C-alpha cells in the first residue's frame, strides 16, 4: 500500500469540542504541510522530515498517525458520553428533549416503576409526542418518524403495555418487526418495562418457537416476524386477528418496501378489524413509502422529520480512500485499535464478503464475531447475546443487523462495503440505519466508510447530497483529509 493509497477523512472541527478542536486543528495544519507522518503512543501526530525511506515506511507512519488520531477522538468522546444525555435532554434542538416528565404522560404506576428501573429519567421528544397520541381515546392511528436510537421502541412498547386489558386473556396487541433479532430485542424491552406489571404476558412469534395448533394464546402481546405471525394467525390459529386492537409495525418503511415483508404485512393487516389502531414507526421513510403508508393507514396522526433532521450530529462520519478489497482490509486492521476501544460493528454487502472478512481478521489474530443471514436462529441469538454482553467486541455482519439492534457500547460503525440498492445506487436509508447502531440515545459515535473505487466514491457523494440540509450538512462532516 503506498502512502497515497488511502487517507482517513477527518473533520476535526466537527468531531471535537472547541478546546480539543483548537489543539487538533493545529496538528492537522502541521500535518497538511508534511508528506511523512508519525504518531506517538498518546495519539499525537508528529510531523517528520522527509527521509529517503521506502513507501512502505511512509505508509506505516501515516497509518499509525491516522489510527492514533481516531483512537484519540473516540477515547475523548467516550469520556464525554457520561453527561451527554442529561445535557441533550435540556437542549430544545435535540431529539431527546422533552418538557414533560414520565408522570405527566400518565403512565400506570407499574409502568412508571419499570421505566425508572431501566434508568430512564425523562422521555425523549418522540416519547413525549407519540405516547399521548397512542393512548388517546378514541384510539388514533399514527405514522411516526424519529432518528435512530431516540427511543421509538420504548415508546411503542409502553403504548402496548398501557393498552392491554389484563382481565382479557387473549392477544390484543400485535407487533411485527423485520428480523428475528429485532423481535427478540423488542420483546426484551417489553419484558423489562413490564417487569412490575405482572398480569401482562408476552409471546414471541418467531422461527423455532414451538406451538400447539388450534389452542388460542392467552398472552395479551405478541411480537414477531411477519411470516411466523401470519402462520400463527392462519395456519395454527393461535391468534384471532379480529381481537387485535393495536397493531404496531416497527421499521415500517422496510416492512412496506421489501416485497416479501410487504405481502405478509398486508395479509396480516387485511385480517384485522377496520377500527384496529395502527402504529407505524421508523427512523426513515422514503417519499414513496410515506405516501403508501398514508394510503393504508386511515386518518393518521403524523410525526415526520425534515430531511436535514434525519442525521444525528452526535455521530461523526469519516471515509477512508482505499484501492481495493485487500487495501480496505489493511486499513481496517490499522483501525483495529479504535474498534476495540468500546465495541464496533462492521457491515459488508454480502454474506460471502462478511465470511471472507471474518476469516481474514481472525487469521490476523483479531477476535471477531460473525452474524449473517444463513446462520441458524439459535446461532444468531447466541452471537448477538455474546456481543451484547461484550464477550466479543467486534461484530462483522450484513444488512441483517443494520436496523434496530441496540447495543449501547457500540462506538464505531465501519461500512466495509457502502450500502447500495439493487441498482447499485446509494441506499441512503440503510446508511442511516447502519450508522445509527452507534450514537444511541445521545451517546457519541463514529462511522467510518471504506471507499475503494470511483463507484463507491460516487455512492458517498450521493449519500452526502441526499442528506444535505441547512442544519446538518453531511459534506461538512464527511470532509476528506488527504496528506
Ligand atoms: N427516555 C429514555 N431515557 C433514557 N434512555 C432511553 C430512553 N428511551 C430509550 N432509551 C434507551 O435508548 C436506547 C435506544 O432506544 P430505542 O432502541 O428505543 O431507540 P429506537 O429509536 O427504537 O432506535 P432504532 O431507530 O435504531 O430502532 C435504548 O438503549 C433505550 O434503552
Image (tube, rainbow, N blue to C red):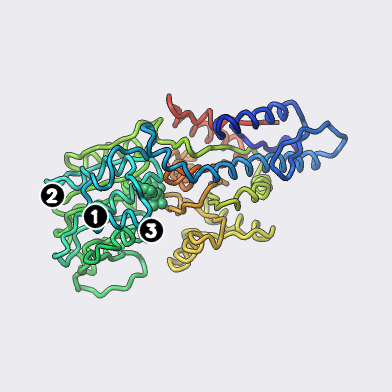
Q: Circle 2 sits on which residue?
A: 275
Which element type, helix, strand or loop, lies under badge 3? Answer: helix
- Residue 422 in sight: no
Q: Is residue 113 placed above or below 99 in the rendered structure? A: below
Q: Alpha-carbon distance for marks 2 and 1? A: 16 Å
Category of crowding for the residue at label 3, using alpha-carbon neighbours closer than 10 angstroms: few (below 14), some (14–19), many (at least 20): some
Quarter of the view holding residue 110? bottom left
- Label disc, if present, on residue 160 of the rendered structure: 1
Q: Circle 3 sits on which residue?
A: 185
- Label count reads 3
Q: Quadrant of the C terminus?
A: top right
Category of crowding for the residue at label 1, using alpha-carbon neighbours closer than 10 angstroms: few (below 14), some (14–19), many (at least 20): many
Mark 3 or 2, closer to the camera:
3
Does the beta carbon at disc 1 come under 8 Å from ligand 1? no
Q: Which circle's residue, 3 or 2, is located before the other in the chain? A: 3
Please name whichever residue, 237 or 174, is drawn nearer the observer in this view of the structure.
174
Please name whichever residue, 353 or 442, is drawn nearer the observer in this view of the structure.
442
Q: Alpha-carbon distance for marks 1 and 3? A: 15 Å
User: Viewed as shown, does residue 396 lie left or right of 97?
Assistant: right
- Picture residue at 28% right of the left edge, 44% below the top: 101
The reply to whether callout 1 and callout 3 are in contact (CB within 8 Å) is: no
Please name whichever residue, 261 or 84, is drawn nearer the observer in this view of the structure.
84
Q: Which circle's residue, 2 or 1, is located before the other in the chain? A: 1
The reply to whether callout 3 and callout 2 are in contact (CB within 8 Å) is: no
Mark 2 or 1, closer to the camera:
1
Amino acid at each position: 500500500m503506498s502512502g497515497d493509497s488511502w487517507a482517513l477523512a477527518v473533520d476535526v472541527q466537527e468531531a471535537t469540542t472547541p478546546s480539543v478542536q483548537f489543539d487538533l486543528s493545529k496538528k492537522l495544519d502541521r500535518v497538511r504541510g508534511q508528506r511523512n507522518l508519525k504518531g506517538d503512543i498518546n495519539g499525537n501526530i508528529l510531523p517528520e522530515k522527509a527521509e529517503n525511506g521506502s513507501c512502505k515506511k511512509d505508509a506505516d507512519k501515516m497509518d499509525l498517525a491516522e489510527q492514533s488520531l481516531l483512537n484519540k477522538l473516540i477515547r475523548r468522546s467516550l469520556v464525554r458520553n457520561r453527561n451527554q444525555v442529561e445535557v441533550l435532554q435540556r437542549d430544545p434542538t435535540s431529539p431527546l428533549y422533552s418538557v414533560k416528565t414520565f408522570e405527566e404522560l400518565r403512565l400506570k404506576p407499574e409502568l412508571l416503576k419499570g421505566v425508572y428501573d431501566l434508568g430512564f429519567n425523562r422521555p425523549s421528544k418522540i416519547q413525549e409526542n407519540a405516547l399521548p397520541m397512542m393512548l388517546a381515546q378514541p384510539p388514533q392511528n399514527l405514522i411516526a418518524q424519529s432518528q435512530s436510537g431516540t427511543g421509538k421502541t420504548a415508546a411503542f412498547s409502553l403504548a402496548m403495555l398501557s393498552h392491554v386489558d389484563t382481565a382479557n386473556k387473549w392477544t390484543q396487541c400485535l407487533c411485527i418487526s423485520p428480523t428475528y433479532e429485532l423481535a427478540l430485542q423488542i420483546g426484551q424491552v417489553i419484558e423489562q418495562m413490564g417487569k412490575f406489571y405482572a398480569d401482562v404476558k408476552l409471546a414471541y412469534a418467531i422461527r423455532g418457537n414451538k406451538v400447539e395448533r388450534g389452542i388460542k394464546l392467552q398472552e395479551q402481546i405478541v411480537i414477531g416476524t411477519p411470516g411466523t405471525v401470519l402462520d400463527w394467525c392462519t395456519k395454527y390459529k393461535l391468534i384471532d386477528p379480529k381481537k387485535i386492537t393495536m397493531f404496531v409495525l416497527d421499521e415500517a418503511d422496510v416492512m412496506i418496501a421489501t416485497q416479501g415483508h410487504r405481502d405478509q404485512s398486508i395479509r396480516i393487516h387485511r385480517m384485522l378489524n377496520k377500527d384496529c389502531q395502527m402504529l407505524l414507526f421508523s427512523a426513515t421513510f422514503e417519499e414513496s413509502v410515506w405516501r403508501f403508508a398514508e394510503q393504508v393507514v386511515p386518518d393518521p396522526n403524523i410525526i415526520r422529520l425534515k430531511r436535514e433532521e434525519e442525521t444525528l450530529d452526535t455521530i461523526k462520519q469519516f471515509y477512508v480512500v482505499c484501492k481495493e478489497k485487500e487495501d480496505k482490509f489493511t486499513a481496517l486492521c490499522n483501525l483495529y485499535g479504535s474498534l476495540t476501544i468500546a465495541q464496533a460493528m462492521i457491515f459488508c454487502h454480502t454474506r460471502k464478503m462478511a465470511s471472507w472478512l471474518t476469516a481474514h481478521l481472525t487469521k490476523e489474530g483479531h477476535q471477531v464475531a460473525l452474524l449473517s443471514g444463513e446462520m441458524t436462529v439459535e446461532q444468531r441469538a447466541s452471537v448477538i447475546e455474546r456481543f451484547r454482553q461484550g464477550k466479543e467486541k467486534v461484530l462483522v455482519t450484513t444488512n441483517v443487523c443494520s436496523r434496530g439492534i441496540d447495543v449501547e457500547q457500540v462506538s464505531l460503525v465501519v461500512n466495509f462495503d457502502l450500502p447500495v440498492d439493487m441498482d447499485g445506487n446509494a441506499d441512503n436509508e440503510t446508511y442511516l440505519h447502519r450508522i445509527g447502531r452507534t450514537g444511541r440515545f445521545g451517546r457519541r459515535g463514529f462511522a467510518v466508510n471504506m471507499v475503494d473505487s470511483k463507484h463507491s466514491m460516487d455512492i458517498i457523494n450521493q449519500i452526502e447530497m441526499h442528506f444535505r440540509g441547512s442544519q446538518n450538512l453531511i459534506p461538512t462532516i464527511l470532509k476528506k483529509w488527504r496528506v
